[in-house]
Amino acid sequence: MKAELDKLVEIMDKKGMATYFTTFGKGAGKYGKRQLFTKVPESVAIAWAWRYKEAKELLYELSKYLTPEQAERRTIHFVNPALKDIPIVGSAGITPTLYGGLQLIKPGEKAPYHRHTAVNFRFILEAPEKGAYTVINGYRIELHKGDLTFQVPWVWHEHGNDGNSDLIWFAGLDAPLIAFLGGMFYEAPESKEEEENIRKSLRGSGEDANKLFGKSVRPILLSYPSYVKEFNTTYNPLVYYPFEDVINALTTLSSKENMDPYNGYVVEYINPLNGGPLFSSISASMILLPSNKILKPIRRVENAVFIVFEGNVTINVEDTDRISAEPHDVIVIPSWKRYSIENSTNSKALIFKYSDSPLFKFLGVYREEYG
Ligand SMILES: [Fe+2]
């Protein structure tokens, strides 16, 4: 009986067909497939941690061989070990949906203009006092440690470092998802002339964008940029979130309010037009965990990445060894894994988090469980 079934499955496989029993159901394991209809979410990704020290060392090793001109950009990105064999996602997925990695721009270097449909944020880890910059949607932004800058789909952007020390940021994108789903468009100027024309369309500084869109009023515009129409993009008109705003909010919050025992003190980076997440596909937040505090366990339907910004923490993840993390270490926690964060030091900890939760919310399958 089994032999006959195996033969039939083989014939179907050759014809590009399959059956519920061997793919969705209980037989999946026996046929080398992963069951689709699991009782609770079972992410294909696993919990993992990457050490900043180690990654930074490798980034500098790499810079001996790759100039930005040769490499387009000099990066090290983090690949979830469990995703390695999946096309596209296995090349660049820290989670099944997200990219996460470091980029180094040395003094005098430039990363040239380009645009793509994948969204992209940069969380600045190291920067010179002045001179590091990015230009997004015609707004030039000076980059400082702790700032978050970003662009929505199809926006021209370039970066450079005219300062006197290295610029390193953590970049997060939804590129694995967009490419895997067949939605990736990428474009670079075809000539120096075109690049210069893009450069000429400078509107102002990042502070100007924040004055227009980051306060209590918003301008009523005659028209939105063409890319908003072209891709029907959820437009986030800001181009950066200064660290100063984030830390001021967290300091006030932690001095006036009781701490949420599961989440700590948290502020979310929001789109000022609709109060929604940073992007349609990615939410981002900063967590402040005071000294000697242990958060209660929680699990969520989301694939989350944590970057320790300040202090030392320990993260306990279900089915995983305790993860001790230092500044700029990167930790990924897949969907529906229970975890808790602990700060047993005498200093506060700041943790930057981004996740694909907006996707699950859009699909109506987001869920969280406290305790
Ligand atoms: Fe880019």
Image: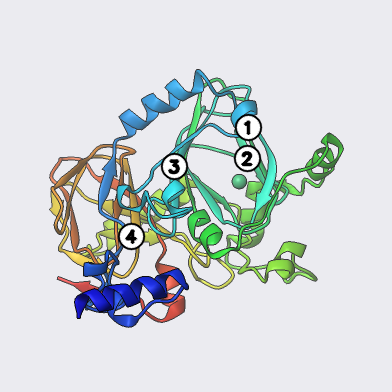
Task: Tell me the quarter of the image containing the C terminus.
Answer: bottom left
Element assignment for label 3: strand
Residue 101: mark in rendering: 3
Question: Does the residue at mark 2 contact the one at mark 1 (Cβ under 8 Å)?
Answer: yes
Left or right: 215 as drawn, with respect to 29:
right
4 or 1: tag closer to the N-terminus:
1
User: Amino acid type of disc 2?
Assistant: Thr
Marks 2/3: CA–CA distance: 17 Å
Residue at (55, 52) in percent of width and height:
120
Question: Does the residue at mark 4 contact the one at mark 3 (Cβ under 8 Å)?
Answer: no
Percent from the top left, x then y, of residue 112? 68, 36
Element assignment for label 4: strand
Q: Residues within 10 Å of mark 3 (few under 14, many from 20)?
A: many
| In the foreground, 239 or 259 | 239
4 or 2: tag closer to the N-terminus:
2
Q: Which residue is mark 1?
A: 160
Element assignment for label 2: strand
In the image, residue 277 sits, relative to residue 91, either above or below, namely below
Q: Which residue is mark 2?
A: 134
Residue located farthest toward the top when viewing the structure as drawn:
64
Left or right: 330 as drawn, with respect to 369:
right
Disc number lying in front (4 or 1): 1
User: Amino acid type of disc 3?
Assistant: Gly
Q: Which residue is mark 4?
A: 266
In the image, residue 214 sits, relative to residue 102, either above or below, namely below
2 or 1: tag closer to the N-terminus:
2
Marks 4/3: CA–CA distance: 23 Å
Marks 1/3: CA–CA distance: 18 Å
2 or 3: tag closer to the N-terminus:
3
User: Which quarter of the picture shows residue 257?
Assistant: bottom left
Marks 4/2: CA–CA distance: 27 Å
